[in-house]
Image (cartoon, rainbow, N blue to C red):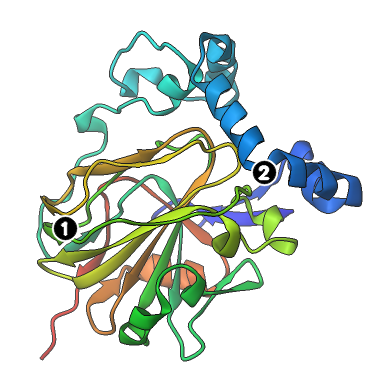
């Protein structure tokens, strides 16, 4: 499957295709049978153990070369496993946090798409529809009608740590058990990953954007979603957590009339194009009501 992404402030569209392995898993009958075995809890745990072992170290150099990762951007570390490398920390200077309190910042490196939360409370992702009610407790979704759902899709070559988008306080984390599917768009033709993947959500009581729901969604091969805090008072740009190995997704839900997104993100989303964004960069503003 092909999908389109754009860099910020660029007219150039990049077409990215799913790799042959994913095509096998999701585009033919035998592959879909095999994926049912891979996503069982036992197999997922075994993958996690392998990725945390020294046996996985041999994967690191190949991954760096294939994805052109500049390791000078990261804090030097003597990695003990592939997962240790995957959750590496970047130098602060490489991901500056926009300090203006009225700026909305991206929580992570990712490909971003924005949606209006309509009366049917659905998300449209690559021509497939997903109920927002399946993400979190549907009893609280009524408050978010007319607001924005921002979907941040992380691929395996992205930086997999994420931060708080503002200062404020957070409620308890709510974990929803699920099964793992890849979040690459090819999977959407056969599986609703928002309904089946494990996820963790919480309400962020932010100082500038009201009550924001943040959902972290796991993917194939991800052993854990690691959030650092439960009930907590946080600061803008402070690290909230990280994903272990695998592509993953973050979804932010905003109430109506709380944010104004940057024009390029709106334009791209309206044309089914994902916008490449970075951890801590400006993606919008607080909406000032007259």
Q: Residue furthest front?
A: 42
Q: Is 186 left, or right, of 222 in this rendering?
A: right
Q: Position of residue 180 (x, y in %)?
A: 60, 47
Q: Residue 282 versus residue 226: which sits nearer the camera?
A: 226
Report whether 94 appears left or right of 273: left
Q: Is residue 161 visible?
A: no
Specify few, some or many for label 1: CA neighbours under 10 Å numbering under 14, 14-19, or 20 or more.
many
Q: Would you place residue 249 above or below residue 57 in this image?
A: below
Q: Would residue 173 be seen by someone viewing this image from the given angle?
A: yes
Q: Secondary structure at mark 1?
A: loop
- What label sits on residue 208 in the rendered view? none
Category of crowding for the residue at label 2, using alpha-carbon neighbours closer than 10 angstroms: few (below 14), some (14–19), many (at least 20): many
Distance between the alpha carbons at the discs numbered 2 and 1: 35 Å
Residue 39, disc: 2
Question: Measured from the top left, where is residue 36 in percent x and y?
Answer: 75, 47
Residue 144 screen position, x and y as percent: 33, 82
Residue found 22% across the figure and 50% down from its top: 230
In the structure shown, which secondary structural element does the residue marked by tag 2 occupy?
A: loop
* Image-based side of 59 in relation to 188, left or right: left
In the rendered image, the quadrant that contains the C terminus is: bottom left
| Nearer-N-terminus badge (2/1) | 2
Residue shown at 81% from the left, 49% from the top: 32
Q: Quadrant of residue 48?
A: top right
Q: Which residue is mark 1?
A: 166
Q: Residue at x 30, y 85 (%)?
A: 143
């Amino acid at each position: 499957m092909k999908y389109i992404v754009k860099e910020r402030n660029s007219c150039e569209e990049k077409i990215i295709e799913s790799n042959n392995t994913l095509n096998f898993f999701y585009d033919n009958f035998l592959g879909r049978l095999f994926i049912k075995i891979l996503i069982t809890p036992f197999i997922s745990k075994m993958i996690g153990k392998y990725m945390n072992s020294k046996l996985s170290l041999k994967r690191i150099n190949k991954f760096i070369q294939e994805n052109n990762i500049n390791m000078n951007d990261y804090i030097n570390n003597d990695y003990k496993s592939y997962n240790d490398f995957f959750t590496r920390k970047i130098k602060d200077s490489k991901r500056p946090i926009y300090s203006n309190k009225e700026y909305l910042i991206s929580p992570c490196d990712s490909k971003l798409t924005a949606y209006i939360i309509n009366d049917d409370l659905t998300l449209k992702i690559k021509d497939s529809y997903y109920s927002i009610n399946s993400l979190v407790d549907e009893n609280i979704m009524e408050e978010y009608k007319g607001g924005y759902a921002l979907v941040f899709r992380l691929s395996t070559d992205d930086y997999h740590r994420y931060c708080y988008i503002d200062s404020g306080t957070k409620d308890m984390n709510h974990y929803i058990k699920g099964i793992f599917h890849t979040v690459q768009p090819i999977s959407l033709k056969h599986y609703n990953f928002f309904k089946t993947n494990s996820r963790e959500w919480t309400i962020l009581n932010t100082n500038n954007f009201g009550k924001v729901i943040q959902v972290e969604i796991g993917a194939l091969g991800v052993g854990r979603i690691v959030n650092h805090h439960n009930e907590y008072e946080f600061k803008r740009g402070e690290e909230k957590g990280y994903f272990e190995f695998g592509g993953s997704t973050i979804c932010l839900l905003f109430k109506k009339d709380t944010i104004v997104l940057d024009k390029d993100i709106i334009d791209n989303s309206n044309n089914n194009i994902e916008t490449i964004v970075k951890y801590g960069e400006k993606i919008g503003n607080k909406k000032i009501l007259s």
